[in-house]
Image (cartoon, helix red, strand yellow):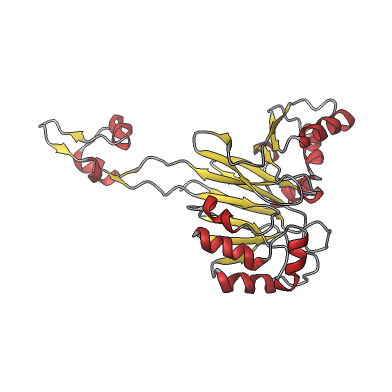
Amino acid sequence: MEPFKLHILGCGSALPTLRHFPTTQVLECRGKLFMIDCGEGAQLQVRKAGLSFNKIGHIFISHMHGDHCFGLIGMISTFGLLGRTAALHVYGEPSLGAVIDFQLNAFCRDLGYEVVFHPVDTTRQAVVYEDRSLTVKTIPLEHRLPCCGYLFREKPTLPHIRRDMLEFYGIPVSQIQNIKNGQDFVMPDGTVVPNDRLVKPADAPRAYAFVSDTQYMPHLAERLKGVTTLYHEATYADDNLEMAEKYNHSTARQAALVARDAGVGKLLLGHYSSRYLDEQVLLRQAQEVFPSSRLTSEFDAIDL
């Protein structure tokens, strides 16, 4: 299967700690790197993780809280210092565009490449990026200011050719694409070899959902059906439920409820409050509801 891997570069929340960086992730898909949020120190984390700056072509920002975007202008500047020429595409709610324009004018007047800003409507689910193998949709969330998550979904691929059958029937290479597209093969004597004898099923498409800062949304599960891996903020444990409600965040248990009701394959927890010196309490409470839960940590490289 083609790589579909998530790199965790930061999984802390707003208050800096010595244990976690602010939210930053990189999704690796078919040779491309997609950055999701860009907290302070993101460029340093990219270097430490051994990821290629040149392969990051798109950055998706969930909302305008600093722990999710303070690293963006530094990343943009570093791209310029490295001699980038390819355009960089940045996605976020409309007010982010004005901030980027101001910062570019103040700090990055001679970048050598174009920064293309794509305003995102955080109130509705819509496709904001698409290529031959992937679509990216917004996921409307409920936080203290406009906020959305992002759903990365692979497109279906063609079935796999059975090389042993090609050799057995003496099928020429020129017919492989036709067979992948569903055609039978007709032998010189007129015998028809059915297509299902010549192929194996295609790999099931994978989907990754990034749910940034949000209050508990029971109805969110409906938007996440068919997701293989869900990252959901889990800022607090049950002991701080009132804090979660006050600041429009979620507890680990609430994240697990969303994962369970959506029927996802696995749940990744992150965006930990700095008050927890040991996140195991978050993991225990999530696993009580959804056993396939795990904590994230900096430099995790997770096959999705």
Identify the residue shown where x is 21% and y is 35%: 185
Q: Is residue 229 left or right of residue 86?
A: left
The quadrant in which residue 58 appears is top right
Q: Position of residue 285 (x, y in %)?
A: 63, 73
- How many numbered circles are shown? 0
Q: Residue furthest left?
A: 189
Q: Position of residue 146 (x, y in %)?
A: 73, 44
Q: Is residue 264 visible?
A: no
Q: Residue furthest right?
A: 106
Q: Position of residue 206 (x, y in %)?
A: 49, 49
Q: Is residue 263 visible?
A: yes
Front in this rendered view, residue 146 or 29:
146
Front in this rendered view, residue 248 or 181:
248
Q: Position of residue 100 (x, y in %)?
A: 80, 34
Q: Is residue 67 above or below residue 185?
A: below
The quadrant in which residue 214 appears is bottom right
